[in-house]
Amino acid sequence: MDSAREEGLYLRQTLFDKARRVVVKVGSAILTSADGLNRDVIANLAREISFLHDSGREVILISSGAVAAGKRKLGFDDRAGLTIRQKQALAAIGQSQLMHDYDEAFARHQKNIAQILLTHADLADRRRYLNVRNTLLTLFSFGVIPVINENDSVSSEELRFSDNDTLGALLANLIEADMFICLTDVDALYDRNPLTDPSARPIYTVSEVTEEIESMAGNSKSVLGTGGMQSKIRAARMVSAGGGSSFIGPGRQPDILKHLFSGEMVGTFFLPMKEKMQSRKRWLAYVLKPKGVVILDEGACLAVSTGGKSLLPSGIVSVEGVFEVGDPVRCVDRLARPIAIGLTNFSSADINMIKGLRSDKIESVLGHKYCDEVMHRDNLVLL
């Protein structure tokens, strides 16, 4: 065994051994069969997660499958495709069936479960975000396994998570989980496309999610689901920033969780970042959806990105979008490259009036001045 592989195996085993709080995400690619939900997969998931729970770990299950359960219950033929309204209605029908199936499967192992349905708004509001955390921690204290899904029956575009990979990563950061396990229908991330290149090799350990790693996402094709490998890599990067590690691997492999926690080299493992991002900074960076964009000049980009400075109106070139005080806004350079995201102290209309000006000119232009900074450093996160 070469030294890099040996080191990767040691790191994996060490982090799996230390993981006391685990988030397991399973998507539609694993849960569904031709006629809807695959109950054999659900039974296997319950058995494996119960194994983790019996080992003294706290576990959350993030599960898709409500729409598939609704289709099965109604015998719904969707060969012509589904409208958004139909998907929402089928999710409402299928969610109770999904939880019924999970409840029965976990009961065989003497486990109690709890259902939580979320929209993005539940995490975008800081108070509700903390309420979700408190509920989950209380469920852990009861010895209960939370089963979480997006609330598909009410989620509109602005309320949706992009996919359950993102939801899983956000919740892993919310509860400061040690491990995020993403079970899917691919066996690993590959350096090249294994379908066209026989020399393609799986990447077993990723120490940092770089542009090169992100470019490999197209090499591992998922048959079903909305996420795809790119969203799973983005999710791993979020969890890494929160100090956790992530795993992407084959959800249908028998006893996959036992294999993982016994240290076998399967799937792709993502190491945590060396410097953990603060909780509120993670909320700013990964939970909030920007309401607009401010374009910065070269001096402001440098001051914000390397100087640790707040954003002043003098460094703003232009504004895109309509937003109000307190909204999340993305900062980019003149080439639209991301610099930061933060909470703005001024509306888009006011910034348009004071852009390029020194802070001592704000009051004379607007008639008032509550602060000098468009975004204070404490409310700003580098991207």
Image (tube, rainbow, N blue to C red):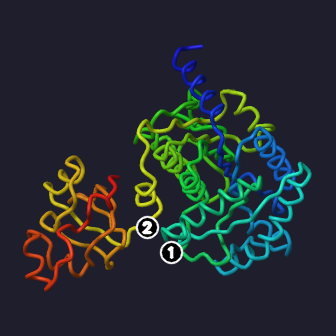
- Residue 202 at x, y percent in the picture: 58, 31
The disc, 2 or 1, on the residue closer to the chain's N-terminal end is 1
Residue closer to the observer: 54 or 297: 54
Residue in view at x 63 percent, y 33 percent: 18
Which quadrant is the N terminus positioned in? top right
Please determine whether, in this image, residue 192 is positioned above or below residue 102. above
Q: Residue furthest bottom?
A: 367
The extreme right residue here reads 108
Q: In the figure, is residue 37 to the left or right of 209?
A: right
| Quarter assignment of residue 321 | bottom left
Query: Residue 158 — which label?
Result: 1
Tell which of 355 and 332 is nearer to you: 355
| Label pair 2/1, CB-CB below 8 angstroms | yes
For the residues marked 2 and 1, what is the alpha-carbon distance in whole angstroms? 9 Å
Which of the 4 image quadrants contains residue 37? Answer: bottom right
Amino acid type shown at disc 2 = Lys
Q: Name which residue lies at 11% across and 80% down.
A: 363
Residue 241 falls left or right of residue 266: left
User: Which dot marks residue 182?
Assistant: none
For label 1, the SS is: helix
In the picture shown, does residue 22 fall above or below 136?
above
Q: Residue at coordinates 62% horizontally, 68% vertically from top-left?
A: 118
Assess disc 1: are there few (<14), some (14-19) or many (≥20) residues with their C-alpha within 10 Å of its C-alpha.
few
Residue type beneath disc 1: Glu
SS class of the residue under badge 2? loop
Indicate the position of residue 375 as horizontal and vertical percent values. Answer: 26, 65
* Residue at x 48% of width, y 68% of height: 126
Q: Nearer the viewer, residue 348 or 75?
A: 348
Residue 196 appears at what percent x and percent y?
58, 36
Residue identified by numbered label 2: 289
Q: Is residue 68 above or below residue 2?
A: below
Residue 261 on image: x %, y % = 71, 32
